[in-house]
């Protein structure tokens, strides 16, 4: 009776090479997925930060405009509704 048939060295090396290649490609795929998730999270964080910065800027401008309108409403010419007296005030305001 004969033992199991022997495989050639070429077939063995090819099998080891294929296992190594599959392992490397699998690890590359996993690393790619992790990096995509990290990049997506970083992009979302940057978007949120930009949105918050824009909101703060708009809020500051609106507060400035509100304070200006409050000060204008305190002027006697505005309270009286005197258009002739308000004209130089609004011209200076521009």
Image (spheres, rainbow, N blue to C red):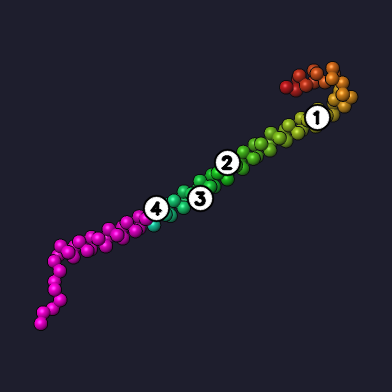
Q: In which quarter of the view is residue 11 placed?
A: bottom left
For residue 41, the mark is 3
Per the image, the residue denoted by label 2 is 50
Who's the residue at 80% across and 32% down the image?
70
Badge 3 local density, few (<14 within 10 Å), some, or many (20+)? few
- Alpha-carbon distance for marks 4 and 2? 27 Å
Q: In the image, 63: left or right of 34?
A: right
Closest to the camera, between mark 3 and mark 1, is 3
Q: Which residues are magenta?
A: 1-29
Q: Residue furthest right?
A: 80
Magenta stretch holds residue 21: yes
Residue 40, compared with residue 77, is above or below; it is: below
Q: Position of residue 61 (x, y in %)?
A: 69, 33
Q: Secondary structure at mark 2?
A: helix
Mark 4 and mark 2 lie on one chain; the one further toward the N terminus is 4
Q: Secondary structure at mark 1?
A: helix
Closest to the camera, between mark 1 and mark 4, is 4
């Amino acid at each position: 009776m004969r033992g199991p048939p022997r495989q050639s060295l070429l077939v063995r090396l090819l099998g080891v090479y294929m296992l190594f290649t599959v392992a490397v490609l699998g690890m590359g795929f996993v690393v790619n997925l992790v990096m995509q998730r990290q990049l997506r999270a970083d992009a979302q964080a940057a978007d949120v930060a930009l949105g918050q910065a824009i909101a703060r800027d708009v809020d500051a401008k609106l507060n400035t405009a509100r304070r200006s309108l409050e000060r204008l409403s305190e002027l006697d010419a505005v309270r009286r509704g005197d258009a002739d007296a308000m004209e130089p005030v609004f011209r200076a305001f521009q």
